[in-house]
Amino acid sequence: TNSPPIHNTCSMASRRCLLLTQALITDQLSVGPNLAKRVVSTAAAAASARARAAKVARLHGRVRPRRSPGALAKEQPSSQSPEPVDDPIWTEVFHKFKQERLQIRRAIWTAYQEGPTGHPRAASLEAAWREPGPGGKAPLPLTPAVLSATSEQQQRLAAGRWLVPGVCIVHKKLGIRGVILGCDPMCTMAGIQAQPFYHCVVDERDRPGAGQLTVFAEEEIDSSRESYPLQNLLVDTLLVNCPGLHGYLPGSKVDAALKRQLAIGGMFEL
């Protein structure tokens, strides 16, 4: 078979040296050590010559540089989730971040309950709730959970930064109102990209029936102050009504479920 033009720049002696090297390896270097060293040295020189020839050819547009499989993979758009579904690091980061965000909402509500004297502190905490990253460059404030996350995980956390237990939501397409009870860092369902899911109480005006519960994917919902107050018998049982937040905070049963999930992992369960 004819060699490509690029290889014509290499000498025939270099080719013979390469063949001899392969033969020596096959024979487990049965020849003397001095000859083996000379052959290996000559083979290295031949490899260097090929590299120089390839560089010259690229400069003249004759061949395209080889790319590693990793480089090729980076150029292809990935349909996979940024993090593995069963990644324990992502699970820990996700739950810690949600707890940090929930603590801010608790502190805001505590400040409102203090009356007018607590309003300045409430305003400061609400600013912290809305705070972007430093200089607007990072997606989130640099809390302990965010600092322990990869940049890809930070982007995912930022996408759901407003979605924590007690926050009222609305379904983007169906218009169904609800409130979040708990969340799972990752779930896979047919036809839906792997992503966080949220366990919600649904407003009975949008889905008739007492005690309606459902699960929504993160991409399906937005936080919605306008959805407050919610009409569902479970709201008074499981949540604490917080008018100053235009939403709710977890009641004792939900709070216990969240702490259990943070401690041992697994899906959210009441």
Image (tube, grey):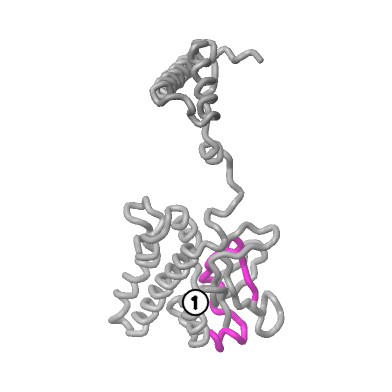
Residue 120: % across, % down: 29, 74
- Residue in the image at 60% along x and 78% along y: 201
> Could you tell whether 147 is left or right of 89 in the image?
left
Left or right: 114 as drawn, with respect to 150: left
The amino acid at mark 1 is Ile
Of 250 and 262, the residue lying toward us? 262
- The part of the chain drawn in magenta is 214-238
Q: Residue at x 40, y 71 (%)?
A: 100
Number of marks in the image? Answer: 1
| Residue 263 seen from this side | yes
Q: Quadrant of the C terminus?
A: bottom right
- x and y, in percent, of residue 87 in the image: 52, 62
Q: Position of residue 134 (x, y in %)?
A: 32, 55
Residue at 58%, 43% (x, y): give it: 77
Q: Is residue 124 above or below residue 4?
A: below
Front-most of residues 65 and 37: 37
Task: Establish if 205 lies above or below 139.
Answer: below
Image quarter where the N terminus lies is: top right
Q: Nearer the viewer, residue 266 or 222?
A: 266
